[in-house]
Image (cartoon, rainbow, N blue to C red):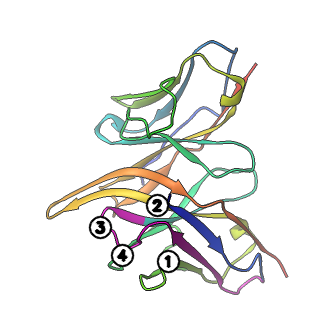
Amino acid sequence: SYVLTQPPSVSVAPGQTARITCGGNNIGSKSVHWYQQKPGQAPVLVVYDDSDRPSGIPERFSGSNSGNTATLTISRVEAGDEADYYCQVWDSSSDHRRVFGGGTKLTVL
Amino acid sequence: QLQLQESGPGLVKPSETLSLTCTVSGGSISSSSYYWGWIRQPPGKGLEWIGSIYYSGSTYYNPSLKSRVTISVDTSKNQFSLKLSSVTAADTAVYYCAREVVVITPGYYYYYGMDVWGQGTTVTVSS
């Protein structure tokens, strides 16, 4: 089965840039989606199809995907960005399985 | 504005069947552009996909849960449902329903992620 690997935690100072990675075998050939989850709340889609943003998501959120690593980049980080972030793919080679990464806790220092 | 709302018992006994329903409002469950999924999150842990259903009844399940899961759709009520049998304490979690955006044409299937989520419902398995 397909596995997505995320760092458990990332820390960044306000105003700086946070990069959260998602590793997977040849993930660059897949479409990666990113979710933000704040405590006690449902996840929110912040990036889909590697690098597109849903309406209402700030331009500070961007994504890229190549080789074995996809990256969510948050520019000019704000205190309100502190949350858990999950990457997700659709594994077409495994009966349309949806796979989530283990999640990364973003701490704003 | 589309909204999803989970409902069902918050407490289930071990070995029994967990049953939840997701009611879709503000849009039709019968759209060809969406799958409808169930996702769960055990306390303090990450997200786990359970399974997904199309308005036609086509389903996909997580292989690790497939033997215990049934997802069904009722287009007349704009609802879809989850049944998880033989539950144990390990099934204690917050259960979410979500809309999944897809493009499906003959010979082509593309997936754009889960763009609308319910608020989640906590299910505890305990005697």
Residue position marked by numbered label 2 in the rendering: B99
What is the x, y in percent for residue A74? 54, 23
Q: Quadrant of the C terminus of chain A?
A: top right
Which of the 4 image quarters holds residue B82? bottom right
Kindly state the secondary structure of the residue where label 3 is placed: loop
Q: As shown in the figure, which amino acid type bears the numbered disc 3?
A: Ser
Q: Residue at x 28, y 38 (%)?
A: A29
Q: Are marks 2 and 1 on the same chain?
A: yes
Note whether residue B62 is visible. no
Badge 3: few (under 14), some or many (20 or more) residues near its Cα, within 10 Å? some
Does A53 sit above or below residue A93?
A: above
Q: CA distance from mark 2 to mark 3?
A: 12 Å
Q: Please name whichever residue, B8 or B26, is drawn nearer the observer in this view of the structure.
A: B26
Q: Chain of mark 3?
A: B
Q: Please name whichever residue, B90 or B118, is drawn nearer the observer in this view of the structure.
A: B118
Residue position marked by numbered label 3 in the rendering: B32
Residue position marked by numbered label 1 in the rendering: B80
Instruction: Choose the circle earlier in sequence order: 4 or 3.
Output: 3
Which of the 4 image quarters holds residue A35? top right
Look at the numbered discs 4 and 3 and tell me whether their residues touch, using CB distance below 8 Å: yes
Q: CA distance from mark 1 to mark 3?
A: 15 Å
Residue position marked by numbered label 4 in the rendering: B55
Whether the magenta-drawn stretch holds residue A39 is answered as no
Q: As shown in the figure, which amino acid type bears the numbered disc 4?
A: Tyr
